[in-house]
Amino acid sequence: MQTNLSHSDLQVDITNRQILKIALPISLAMLVPQINFITNNVFLGQLGETELGSAGITGVFYLVFALVGNGLNSGLQGLISRRAGENRPEEIGKLFGQAVRLALIMAFTCIALTVVLSPVFFRASLHSGTVQDEAISFMQIRIWGLPFLYLFQMGNAFLVGTLNSRYMKYAFAVEAGINIFLDYVLISGHWGFPKLGFNGAAVASVTAEVIAVLIVYSIIIYKKFHLRFNLFSNFRYQAKLTGLIFRQSAPLVMQWILSVGAWMLFYILIENMGERPLAISNTMRNVFGFFGIFTWAFASTTNTMVSNVIGQGRKELVFGMIHKIMWLSFWFTCLLCLLVNLFPDLIFSIYSQQSSFTREGIPVIRIVSVGLLFMSLSTVWLNAVTGTGNTKVNLLIEIAAIVFYCLYVWLVIRVWKLGLVWAWGSEIIYWITLLGFSYYYLRSGKWKAKRI
C-alpha cells in the first residue's frame, strides 16, 4: 500500500550544505571498496611483484564488468533523482524493480562471457606464463560476485537518488571489515584457514560483496523505504520503463566499458615493459582510486542534483550549482594531492617492496597527482551531462577522450618508448579532453530540451 509522502525531503537545495550532505556519505561509502582494493594488494604484495602485477591486470579486467553495473547505477540514479525533483515518488519503486531485473540479466550474461572468454583473452594478451595462470584462476572465482555487486549498486542508486546517501556507509563499512579479515586469513592461511594465495583475495572479495548486499537491503527494509516507495512490488516486466532505463543506462555502460577497456590496453602495454613497471602501475591505480574518492563522490552528487533541479523546473540554477560542486571537488583533491606528494615513501612502503621500487615509483606519483587535479574538474562536468539525461552525449564525449588517450599511450609506450612517467601522462590527456567537451556541450544549451 502506498504511504503518504512529504515531498520536500525529495527535492534538493542549491547550497554547500546540501552538496556536502550528499557527497560526504558517498565519499565515505566509496572509500571502503578502495580500502578493499588496497588491502588485497598489500597482502598480495607480500607474495611478490608478480602477484602484485597480476592483481593489477585482473583488477582492471574485473572493473570492465563491474562498471557495467556502475552504468546502470548512474542511469537509474539520474532517473530516480528526476522523479524525486518532479514529486513523483510513486514512479521510483517502478523504476527500481525494473532496474533490478535488468541488472541480474546483465550480471549472469557477464559471468557467462567471463567463464568462456577470460582464458582466451589472458593467454593471447599477456606474455608471462605465471601471470596468465594466476589471472585466469583468479577471474574464474572473482566474477561470481557480480550479481551481488549489481544488486548492491541498484540499492545505492536508490539511496542516493532519494537523498538518503547517509545510510550507504554501514554496508560499506561491514564489507571492508569482512574483506580485510578474509584477505588476512585466506591469502596466507592464518588461524587454521586454507592457504589460497592469490585466489584467496578473490574468495574474500566475493564473500564481502554477498554480505554487503544483504546489509543494504536490510537497511532499506528497516527504514521502511520498501513500503514508502513500493520497491518490491514492481518486478513484473514493464516494457516502457525497462526501455527507458536501458536507453538511459546503455550509453553509460558503454562509456564505462570503453574507459576501463582503454585502461586494460594501458596495463597490457605496461606488462610488456616488465613486471616492475606493471607492479608500480598497479600501485598507481590504487592511488587514483583511493585519492579520487572525493572526486567521484562530488561527481555522483552532480548527477543527482542536476537531474533533481531540472525535475523541479529550475534549469537556470544548473550552472551555479555545477560551479559550487566543482570548486569543492577541486579543493578537496588539492589537499589530498598535497598529502600524496609530501609523503610518497609512506604510500609505497605499505606494499612491502624494495627501496628501488619506491625510487622508481615517486616520479610516477607526481604525474598522477596532476591527473587527479584535472579529474576533479572533469568528472563534475561529465556527470552534469549525465544529470541532464542526454547520456548519448556522455558516450560520444568518452569516445573522443578514449581516441586521444589510446593514441597517446600507443605512441609513448610502443613507438617512442619514453618510459613509465610519460605513459602515465595519458591521464592528463584523457581528463582534459573530457573536461573540454563536457563544458562545451553544457554551454551550448542543447540539453534544455531533453525530456526523460
Image (spheres, rainbow, N blue to C red):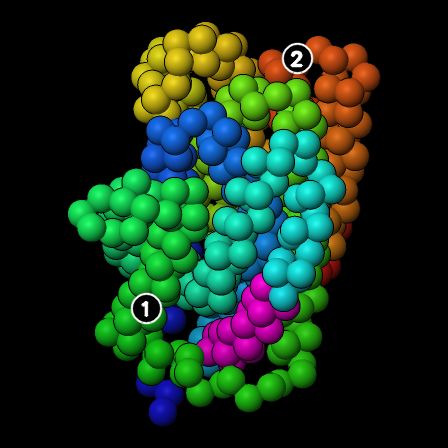
Q: Quadrant of residue 401?
A: top right
Q: Is residue 275 visible?
A: yes
Q: Residue furthest left?
A: 191
Q: At label 2, which amino acid type do we have?
A: Gly
Q: Answer left or right for 178 relative to 316.
A: left
Q: Residue at x 42, y 20 (%)?
A: 337
Q: Nearer the viewer, residue 340 or 138?
A: 138
Relative to 141, residue 362 above or below: above
Q: Answer left or right for 240 relative to 171.
A: right
In front of the other: label 2 or label 1?
A: 2
The residue stretch that appears in magenta: 92-111
Res. 214 mark:
1
Q: Residue at x 39, y 13 (%)?
A: 354
Magenta span has 212? no
Callout 2: helix, strand or loop? loop
Query: Mark 2 or 1 closer to N-term?
Result: 1
Q: At label 1, which amino acid type do we have?
A: Leu
Q: Residue at x 67, y 81 (%)?
A: 240
Res. 419 mark:
2
